[in-house]
């Protein structure tokens, strides 16, 4: 049995993104649980960027996403769109990372110690989900 996702995000949305971008649904849930974002939420960062919605997508992605017709409003108020875009970003980071954990950490930060800490948190959370789903 798959662990239930954080509130406001349906398993249907998570499974769709998992299939579309070849990222395990449990990994997406792990990231969602670490990010703890909510629909409608915008969180200001120290570096003058901000994070949007359930997967806390950084505003630095907005110019790239605009080329695909995706707006901040889409990310902020559409949980499925937020998970879809967040999973696309996560899949890109994993594909370009030097290894899996670095790629997962790159979703959060390219700064080494922040990257390693985030990757470690996701790994621990993923293991908990795997144990709980047995």
Image: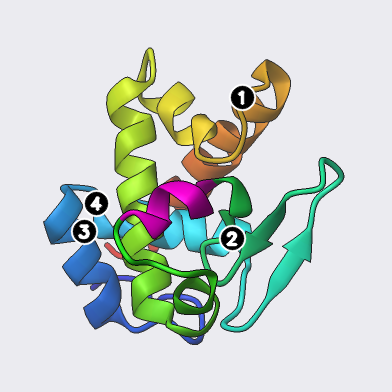
**Image x and y of residue 46, in percent:** 87, 45
Q: Which residue is mark 2?
A: 56
Disc 2 element: loop
Judge whether residue 66 is colored magenta. yes
Quarter holding residue 120: top right
Q: Are marks 3 and 4 in contact (CB under 8 Å)?
A: yes
- Position of 48 with respect to 60 (left or right) is right
Give the answer, above or below, for where 114 lies relative to 9.
above
Q: Mark 4 — residue?
A: 24
Q: Tell me the crowding category of disc 3: few under 14, some 14 to 19, or many 20 or more residues within 10 angstroms, Cα based.
A: many
Q: Looking at the image, tell me whether mark 3 or mark 1 is earlier in sequence order.
A: 3
Query: Which segment is the magenta one?
Result: 61-67
Along the polypeptide, which appears first: circle 2 or circle 1?
2
Q: Which residue is mark 1?
A: 116
Q: Nearer the viewer, residue 45 or 94?
A: 45
The reply to whether the C-beta atoms of the residues labelled 3 and 2 are less than 8 Å apart is no
């Amino acid at each position: 049995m798959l662990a239930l996702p954080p509130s406001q995000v349906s398993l249907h949305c998570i499974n769709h993104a998992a299939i579309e971008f070849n990222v395990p649904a449990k990994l997406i849930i792990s990231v969602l649980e670490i990010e703890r974002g909510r629909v409608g939420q915008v969180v200001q960062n120290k570096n003058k960027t901000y994070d949007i919605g359930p997967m806390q997508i950084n505003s630095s992605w907005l110019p790239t996403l605009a080329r695909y017709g995706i707006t901040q409003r889409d990310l902020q108020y559409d949980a499925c769109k937020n998970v879809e875009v967040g999973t696309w970003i996560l899949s890109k980071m994993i594909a370009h990372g030097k290894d899996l954990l670095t790629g997962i950490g790159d979703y959060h930060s390219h700064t080494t110690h922040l990257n390693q800490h985030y990757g470690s948190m996701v790994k621990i959370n993923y293991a908990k989900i795997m144990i709980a789903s047995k």
